[in-house]
Amino acid sequence: MVSHLINKTVPFNFRGMHFKFDLSQGLFSSESVDFGTRLLLAVFSRVLDGDAAAGRAPPCRVLDAGCGTGVIGICAASALIALSALPDAVYVRCQDRDDLARLVTLHNAAKNRISPLVLEAYTEPLLAGPADGRWDLILSNIPAKAGRPVLEDFVRRSACLLNPGGRVIIVVVQALADFFRGIIAADAELVLEKKGPGHSVFVYGGKAAGAFPPAEPVSAGPGFFSRYPFYVRSAVTCPIEEMPIRLETVQGASGYDAPGGAVLAAAKLARRIGLQKLIPGDAVLLVHEGGQGFFPAWLLGLLAGAPGDSKMLVASGRNILALEASRHNSAADIVTAVDLQLGRAALLEAAGGKFAFIAAFPELLPQSTLPKGADQLDFLWEALPPLLARGGLFLAAFSSSEAERFDRKKPAGAGFSRLGSVKRKGFRSLAYQF
């Protein structure tokens, strides 16, 4: 799957080692290794040389927080294996909120001959990990749009997740340098600051033992926003098809504070085809790429029926924070199926069978960036029959041009009949029965 989402391969050199990285239009820095990453790695190399000169052993346990395409974690793994007296002890955990980043990171690790015993990648929030996880080194080209409360927690929590003598190295955009400098001064010990054009790198360690209560790694799952309220962006109430939807939006997920045209078109179409009359009370529902959770919350409100109803809604998609938002904002037992590598098996296991209804809001990459012959709309049609129960309903929303192309690509003889179509604000929603 990953090979169909690669738009460019770039060479990269670090500490005399030669790498090749595949990049994707769906991830940050899709045309080259960005300057911030280059600056962070230059400072990391300087730190390694300083440690060697001082007779200090290189770090073994490393966390790459917000890994993107995996450049930082892969370069770190290679450098530490080369330096370590015990190369088998080197372990790098790469993490990103986006499952595409996890897949591309693993793809690039294999491409650069990094063993899966050395480098693992996970779809998870920043600073998640094993309950007892502590690190010799945390590296991050930290996402500036994560929200200042999230960034403040990152500094405080990362400093508390270090082994004795451990350090954190982060690169930040220059506009946030003063903010980070102040937080580090309050919550950590600044070791080094390096300024570059548009970016600054900070190296810091933990405060003296006992200066702060010990912090634990972040953990996803039910109650996520109760444990980490700094991820909440705002509380909003929005009418969708005359039904008021109240939810809390989350930093780091698409959609922000209002339902977009795709959601409005999908809801209007669901009303038009009488969806509430077509779905049985014990149905298992799937919403793919539900963003902040506007559509899942509205859908469950639309389908609310007799007390005996036992509907369950499964959320799937790339962004772990968006899945947590869908879980948080829906009055149902939502099962998140994040791991796209497990894909169909994970979804069917979560549902306990096939789905009576699937709604999808695909986040498509520009078709011009994909390899010749690769079409994400073909992949979507191919994915549906194994997931959708016979007689089940499928509803999707795209931009108007993508929707027209999707409808034209409906495979002949696959058993799908179109039930309706609605346009709204440059988007179009389509409904089919299988």
Image (cartoon, rainbow, N blue to C red):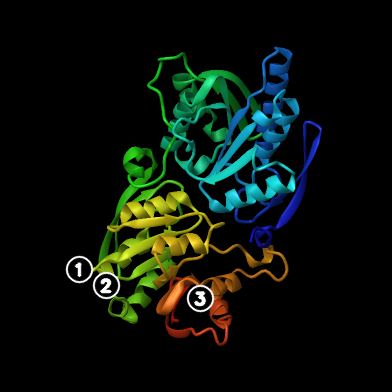
Front-most of residues 39 and 300: 300
For residue 333, side relative to residue 131 (left or right)? left
Name the residue that disc number 3 marks.
385
Instruction: For mark 1, give the secondary structure.
Output: loop
Q: Label 1 to label 2, Cα distance in Å?
A: 8 Å
- Point out the image quarter for the C terminus: bottom left
Name the residue that disc number 2 marks.
281
Residues at circles 1 and 2 in contact by the CB criterion of under 8 Å: yes
Q: Label 1 to label 3, Cα distance in Å?
A: 29 Å
Residue 102 appears in view: yes
Looking at the image, residue 430 lies above or below residue 352: below
Q: Amino acid at mark 3?
A: Pro
Residues at circles 3 and 2 in contact by the CB criterion of under 8 Å: no
Q: Amino acid at mark 2?
A: Gly
Q: Mark 2: give few (<14), some (14-19) or many (20+) Cα within 10 Å.
A: some
Name the residue that disc number 1 marks.
308
- Residue at 65 percent across and 60 percent down: it is 5
